[in-house]
Amino acid sequence: MDTFNVFDVSAALIERINRDYAEDVAIAAYYGSYLDGTASERSDLDFFFIPTNPDGYKAGLTFILNGISFDFWPIDWERAERMSKLEDGQAGILADCKLLYVRSDEDLDRFNDLKHRIKDIRAFEGEEAFLLRADQVLSEVYPLLHELYQAGSGRPLSFYRLQAFEVMMPVFEAIALLNRTYLRKGWGRNLTQLYDLPIRPANLEATVHTILRSPDVPETSAALIRLVDATALLVEERRRTLQSPAADEIGRGTGFFEEFKGLLDKLQTACERGDYELAFFTAAHAESQLNGFLVYMETGQWGKGAQGAEAGRRIAEQAKLPALMPLLDPASLIPLQSAAHWLEISLERYLRAKGVEIRKFGTVEELRGYLLDPKA
């Protein structure tokens, strides 16, 4: 009996392209286990193609041959572009593949340009671009964690393990981005690469081990939260190391206090009138705005969600800026009113100490003078 050769499968598909889709397919390539030498007797040949027009998509085919599942699937040029910018978690498919078919020299040049761009981005692109992308990827995780929280611990273990898979995929991509690289292998086979990366969450291997193997639902959920929080903290720490010069910080801070004071004035008025509902919403709005702004002033990225609130509060505590929400009390709004007054004073001092101009005038004539010559 002849030995089965998966490359005979690719040869048959390329013959079909040459016969039926010669002008409709630009590139065909393979990647994965047969390229990196890890294929087993059950391994399929991981291959893809790039269509040039709608008819080219018809070249795609899924089938089973000799008991092995095959998927010859399309990647359009637009997705290949995203891969080349590490905006797609499957960039390794593009970066680490071998060509089976090329329609023209122009297609080859275009394809090679995208592959080379991945290397160029890793070598030359500013780290801030990678941090921004890591932030975007991590944002996909928080709705999943919310679902876990809502589920409590009463669902089957299989439910939590499926959720864990959905959480770990973007987290692993974010860790790779922190290292200005991409995941070279598919899920499960990329752990060795992750554990060897220089920038990674503390105890990453132990945390992932718990997520994958623990039969205890609370322990699994807690490990997932640790993994997400540790990765988000790494992004924040890396961003702090890239903190912009003071001139940029001054620019970010300009104009905030003048607008924010209006919120504090509204809060103090609500406290004076004993309007607890208005005081509640105004205090929450003011504290949320302040936390987001403090993160933005330091990093250039507005603090959002629970992570942004925690980061902003840490900065506020270091600057000795009073918190508002802990002082909300339906029985007495006097402490909250006092805190709002002190926050106005201390925030102005904080910003002035950083060199931020506060546009504050005592008379209309002073305003007119400023309008005539802002630099005077």
Image (spheres, rainbow, N blue to C red):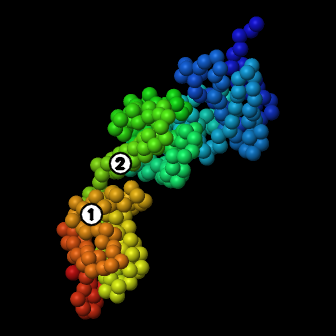
Residue at (39, 39) in percent of width and height: 179
User: Dot 2: what SS?
Assistant: helix
Label 2 sits on residue: 233
Instruction: Please provide percent x and percent y for residue 365.
Output: 25, 92
Q: Is residue 73 left or right of residue 196?
A: right
Q: Which mark is residue 137?
A: none
Question: In this orientation, which residue lies closer to the viewer: 199 or 154?
Answer: 154
Q: Is residue 218 visible?
A: yes
Label 1 sits on residue: 316
Q: Is residue 355 visible?
A: no
Residue at (52, 31) in percent of width and height: 188
Q: Amino acid at mark 2?
A: Leu
Dot 1 crowding, Cα within 10 Å, few <14, some 14–19, many 20+? some
Residue at (66, 24) in percent of width and height: 44
Q: Is residue 147 above or below residue 114?
A: below
User: Which quadrant of the figure contains the C terminus?
Assistant: bottom left
In primary-sequence order, the first of circles 1 and 2 is 2
Q: Residue furthest right?
A: 20
Q: Amino acid at mark 1?
A: Ala
Instruction: Please provide percent x and percent y for residue 91.
Output: 53, 38
Q: CA distance from mark 1 to mark 2?
A: 17 Å
Question: In this orientation, which residue lies closer to the viewer: 141 or 235?
Answer: 141
- Whether residues under marks 1 and 2 lie with C-beta atoms below 8 angstroms apart, the answer is no
Instruction: Please provide percent x and percent y for residue 328.
Output: 33, 73
